[in-house]
C-alpha cells in the first residue's frame, strides 16, 4: 500500500501545479489591477515587476503553512488514510472552483477557498467518525477556536479594507485633489517617503525575518533595530522621492510600480499556502507514516502538530510556476478587467445588474450622507467639493482612474496583507485588495446613484460567489467522506442522504447511486458476520460433544494401547484448538455490538492479567513486571482481552528465564500501553503480517506453543474499535516491544 499512498501524494502535487495555474490566474487581479487600471507603464513592464515580486515572495514564504497542517483540524485525532481523503477532496474541489470563477471572469478568494474546503471536508468526516465513536465531540476533531479566528479574520479584513480604503483615499484626495500635479511641491516627497518606507518595512523586514534562511542572530538584530531602520528609510526615501520630483520624474508611477512589486510579494508570501500547503502537509504525513506507521490502518498523524519546515525546492518550483502562469494566462486578464470596471472613475457599461439588497444599501447610504451634509458647515462643504472637483482631472488616456488612487490602493493593500502575514493571519488577499479598491473608488465619488447599485451588486457577487459554489459542491465532499468511512469499516450505516430536489439533479442521482451501493455493501457485510456467528454457534455444540466423548473414552480406557492413547490425545488437542478458534471467531463477529463506555483503569487491569497468567509464566520460567497507570474509556471486556492476548503471546514466545513487562504511560494526547518481552524477536518482513488472521511467523514451531492464529487479529480489531492502533514498536534478537496507542 505504501506505493499507492506515494502515488496519491504525487497526484496531490500534480493537482497543486494545476491549482497554482488557476490560482494565479484568479489572484493576479490583487497586484495588477491598480497598475493596469491607471496605465502606469507598458503592460510588459508591469508583468516583469509583478513576476519578480512573486518569485521573491514565494522563496520567503514558510510561516503560513501551519494553517493547512493543524489550523482547521486536530491531526492527532485522524488516521493517515483519513487525512489523505480530506487532502484529495480539498485539492480537487479547489481546482474546479477556481477554474469556474476564472472562466466567468470573477475574482474570488483562494484563502477562503482553502479554509472552507478544509473545514467542509473535516466536518463531513467528523460526522462519520462521531457516529462510530462514543463520547467524542466536534471540538475533539475540529480546531474550532483556530478555525473561528481564521474565518473571523477573513471577514473582518473585508470590512477593515473597505473602511480604511475609503478613509485614506478621502484624505489623499483632500491633499492632492484630482489635479495632483499642482499640489506636489513638497508633499510628494513626504508621501513617497512614507509609502516606500512602509513597503520596505513590512515587505522586507517583516517578510524576510520569518524565512528559513534567517539566523537567530540576524532576527534578533532586526528586532532590536527596527525603529532605527524605519526612521532611516523614511528620511532616505523622502529625500530620494523629492529629488526625483525635481528631476520631473513622476513619483506616483514609482510608488505604484513599487507597490505592485510589494503586493505581488505579499500575495506569494501569504497565499502560497493556499496552493501547496495541503500537498506539503500530505507529503509530511506520508514521510511520518512510512517511517513510523507503515502497514497500519490506524496511525494517528500527531506529527502535523509540529512546525512546518518547507524545503526550498518546493518554494522555488512553486514560484517559477506562478511566474510562468502570470506571463501566459488569458483568464487572468479577464479577471483583472472585472475588478478595474467595478472601480473605474467614469460610468460606462456595467457588467452586473441591479438587486434589491444593493438598492437598499444605496438608499440607506444616501440617507446617511444627506444627514452628514446637513450638519456640515457650508464653507467646509464648499472647500471639500473644490478638492474633489474632477474638472481637468489628470487621468491617462484609456485609464480607469488616476495615479493617486492607484498608489493608495497598492500601498494600503500591501500594508494590510503584510500586517496579517506577520501576525500569521490568513487574510484573503483577493478580498483585501478588492475591497480597498471599492473603498477608494467610493471615496473618489466614482459611484453615482445608479452605478452604485450595479457595483454593489458586483461586490456582493464577488464576495458571495464562492460560498454559493462551495455550497453546491458540499455534497461531493460529503460523498467522499462517507465512502472513505465505509471503506475503512468505521460506520457501515453512513449514507449521503441528500434531499430529492429534482429528478434530473445529477448530484442527487450520483448520491442515490452511492447510497444504493452502500446498502448492498452493508447487507453483504452483515451476511458475512451473520454466517461467521451462526457457523461458530453451530460448531460449538458438536465440538463440545466430541470433546466430552473423548474425555469419557480416556477415563474408561486408562489401559488403552499406546497407539490408541496417542490418537485420543491428538484428537483432544485438535478438538480443543477448534473450540478455541470457534470461540475467537464468534467474539470477532460480535465486536461492533459491544458498548465502549466503561471507565477503565489500565494499571489494576494489567496487574489482574499478570495474576491470571502467573501459572503459565511460572511454567515457562518467565518473570512478570508491571508499571505505570492510565485511565481510558472503552469496553472493559475487550481491553482486558487485548492486553491478555499480547501478554500471553509475550510469555509463550519468550526465552526460559526471560521477562515480560507491561508499561503504561500518557504521551501527549494518547495513552500508550507497551508489552515487552525478551524473546527471539520478529523478522522485519513479518511485522505487518502478524496481525492477519491465521498468520504464523514459524508454522513448524507455532503449533507447539498453542493458539489458533487469531489472537493478534483480535487485538488489531479491538484497538481499531477504540480509535487506536497496535504495532511492533521495536524488535531485535534481544526481544520485542508491542505498543498499543489509544486516544485520551
Image (spheres, rainbow, N blue to C red):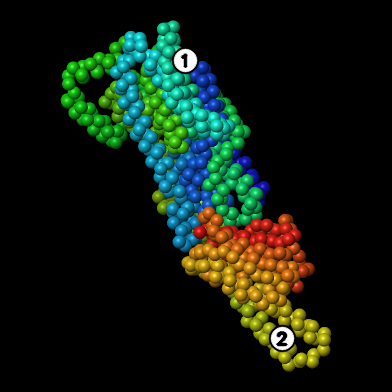
Whether residue 309 is visible: yes
Residue at image coords 36%, 11%: 186
- As drawn, the residue found furthest toward the top would be 247
- Give the residue number, with chain letter if any, for mark 1: 41
> Where residue 27 sits: x, y (%)?
47, 30
> Where residue 359 sits: x, y (%)?
27, 32
- Give the residue number, with chain letter if any, for mark 2: 550
> Where residue 340 sits: x, y (%)?
40, 23
Classify residue 472 by image quadrant. top left
Label 1 sits on a secondary structure element that is: loop
On screen, residue 514 above or below 312: below
Q: Do the residues labelled 1 and 2 touch (CB within 8 Å)?
A: no
Determine which of the numbered discs, if any, sits on residue 243 in the image.
none
Name the foreground residue: 179 vs 71. 71
Answer few, some or many: residues within 10 Å of disc 1's Cα (few below 14, many 20 plus, some between 14 and 19).
Answer: some
Residue at image coords 66%, 81%: 543
Amino acid at each position: 500500500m505504501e506505493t499507492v499512498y506515494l502515488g496519491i501524494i504525487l497526484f496531490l502535487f500534480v493537482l497543486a501545479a494545476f491549482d497554482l495555474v488557476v490560482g494565479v490566474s484568479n489572484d493576479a487581479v490583487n497586484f495588477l489591477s491598480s497598475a493596469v487600471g491607471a496605465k502606469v507603464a507598458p503592460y510588459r513592464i508591469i508583468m516583469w515587476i509583478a513576476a519578480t515580486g512573486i518569485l521573491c515572495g514565494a522563496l520567503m514564504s514558510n510561516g503560513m503553512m501551519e494553517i493547512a497542517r493543524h489550523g482547521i483540524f486536530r491531526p492527532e485525532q485522524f488516521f493517515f488514510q483519513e487525512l489523505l481523503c480530506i487532502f484529495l477532496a480539498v485539492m480537487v474541489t479547489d481546482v474546479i472552483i477556481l477554474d469556474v470563477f476564472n472562466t466567468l471572469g470573477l475574482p474570488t478568494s483562494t484563502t477562503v477557498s482553502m479554509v472552507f474546503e478544509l473545514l467542509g471536508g473535516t466536518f463531513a468526516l467528523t460526522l462519520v467518525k462521531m457516529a462510530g465513536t462514543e463520547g467524542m465531540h466536534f471540538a475533539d476533531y475540529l480546531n474550532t477556536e483556530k478555525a473561528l479566528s481564521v474565518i473571523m479574520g477573513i471577514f473582518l479584513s473585508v470590512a477593515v479594507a473597505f473602511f480604511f480604503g475609503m478613509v485614506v483615499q478621502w484624505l489623499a484626495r483632500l491633499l492632492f485633489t484630482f489635479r495632483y500635479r499642482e499640489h506636489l511641491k513638497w508633499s510628494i516627497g513626504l508621501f513617497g517617503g512614507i509609502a516606500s518606507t512602509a513597503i520596505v518595512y513590512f515587505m522586507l523586514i517583516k517578510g524576510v525575518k520569518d524565512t528559513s534562511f534567517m539566523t537567530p542572530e540576524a532576527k534578533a538584530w532586526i528586532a532590536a533595530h527596527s525603529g532605527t531602520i524605519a526612521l532611516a528609510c523614511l528620511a532616505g526615501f523622502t529625500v530620494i522621492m523629492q529629488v526625483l520630483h525635481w528631476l520631473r520624474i513622476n513619483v506616483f508611477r514609482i510608488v505604484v510600480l513599487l507597490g505592485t512589486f510589494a503586493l505581488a510579494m505579499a500575495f506569494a508570501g501569504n497565499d502560497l499556502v493556499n496552493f501547496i500547503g495541503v500537498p506539503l502537509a500530505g507529503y509530511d504525513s506520508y514521510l511520518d507514516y512510512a517511517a513510523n506507521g507503515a502497514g497500519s490502518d490506524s496511525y494517528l498523524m500527531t506529527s502535523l502538530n509540529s512546525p512546518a519546515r518547507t524545503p526550498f525546492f518546493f518554494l522555488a518550483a512553486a514560484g517559477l510556476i506562478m511566474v510562468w502562469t502570470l506571463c501566459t494566462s488569458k483568464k487572468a486578464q479577464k479577471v483583472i478587467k472585472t475588478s478595474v470596471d467595478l472601480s473605474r472613475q467614469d460610468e460606462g457599461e456595467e457588467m452586473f445588474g441591479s438587486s434589491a439588497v444593493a438598492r437598499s444599501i444605496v438608499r440607506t447610504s444616501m440617507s446617511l450622507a444627506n444627514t452628514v451634509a446637513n450638519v456640515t458647515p457650508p464653507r467646509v462643504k464648499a472647500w471639500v467639493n473644490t478638492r474633489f472637483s474632477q474638472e481637468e482631472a489628470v487621468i491617462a488616456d484609456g485609464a480607469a482612474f488616476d495615479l493617486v488612487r492607484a498608489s493608495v490602493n497598492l500601498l494600503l493593500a500591501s500594508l494590510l496583507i503584510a500586517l496579517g502575514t506577520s501576525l500569521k493571519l490568513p487574510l484573503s488577499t483577493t478580498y483585501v485588495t478588492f475591497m480597498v479598491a471599492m473603498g477608494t473608488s467610493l471615496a473618489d465619488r466614482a459611484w453615482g446613484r445608479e452605478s452604485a447599485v450595479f457595483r454593489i451588486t458586483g461586490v456582493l457577487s464577488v464576495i458571495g460567489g464562492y460560498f454559493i459554489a462551495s455550497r453546491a459542491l458540499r455534497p461531493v465532499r460529503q460523498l467522499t467522506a462517507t465512502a472513505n468511512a465505509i471503506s475503512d469499516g468505521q460506520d457501515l450505516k453512513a449514507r449521503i442522504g441528500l434531499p430529492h430536489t429534482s429528478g434530473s439533479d445529477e448530484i442527487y442521482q450520483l448520491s442515490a447511486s452511492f447510497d444504493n451501493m452502500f446498502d448492498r455493501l452493508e447487507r453483504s457485510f452483515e451476511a458475512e458476520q451473520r454466517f461467521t456467528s451462526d457457523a461458530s454457534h453451530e460448531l460449538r455444540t458438536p465440538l463440545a460433544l466430541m470433546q466430552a466423548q473423548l474425555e469419557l473414552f480416556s477415563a474408561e480406557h486408562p489401559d488403552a494401547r499406546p497407539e490408541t492413547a496417542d490418537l485420543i490425545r491428538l484428537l483432544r488437542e485438535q478438538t480443543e484448538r477448534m473450540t478455541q478458534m470457534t470461540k475467537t471467531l464468534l467474539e470477532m463477529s460480535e465486536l461492533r455490538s459491544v458498548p465502549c463506555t466503561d471507565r477503565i483503569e489500565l494499571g489494576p487491569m494489567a496487574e489482574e492479567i499478570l495474576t491470571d497468567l502467573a501459572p503459565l509464566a511460572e511454567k515457562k520460567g518467565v518473570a512478570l513486571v508491571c508499571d505505570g497507570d492510565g485511565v481510558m474509556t472503552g469496553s472493559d471486556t475487550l481491553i482486558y482481552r487485548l492486553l491478555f492476548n499480547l501478554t500471553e503471546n509475550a510469555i509463550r514466545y519468550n526465552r526460559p528465564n526471560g521477562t515480560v513487562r507491561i508499561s503504561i504511560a500518557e504521551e501527549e494526547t494518547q495513552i500508550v500501553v507497551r508489552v515487552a518481552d525478551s524473546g527471539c524477536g520478529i523478522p522485519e518482513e513479518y511485522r505487518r503480517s502478524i496481525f492477519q488472521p491465521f498468520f504464523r511467523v514459524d508454522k513448524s514451531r507455532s503449533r507447539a506453543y498453542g493458539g489458533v492464529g487469531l489472537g493478534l487479529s483480535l487485538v488489531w480489531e479491538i484497538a481499531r474499535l477504540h480509535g487506536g492502533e497496535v504495532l511492533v514498536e521495536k524488535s531485535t534478537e534481544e526481544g520485542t516491544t508491542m505498543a498499543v496507542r489509544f486516544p485520551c
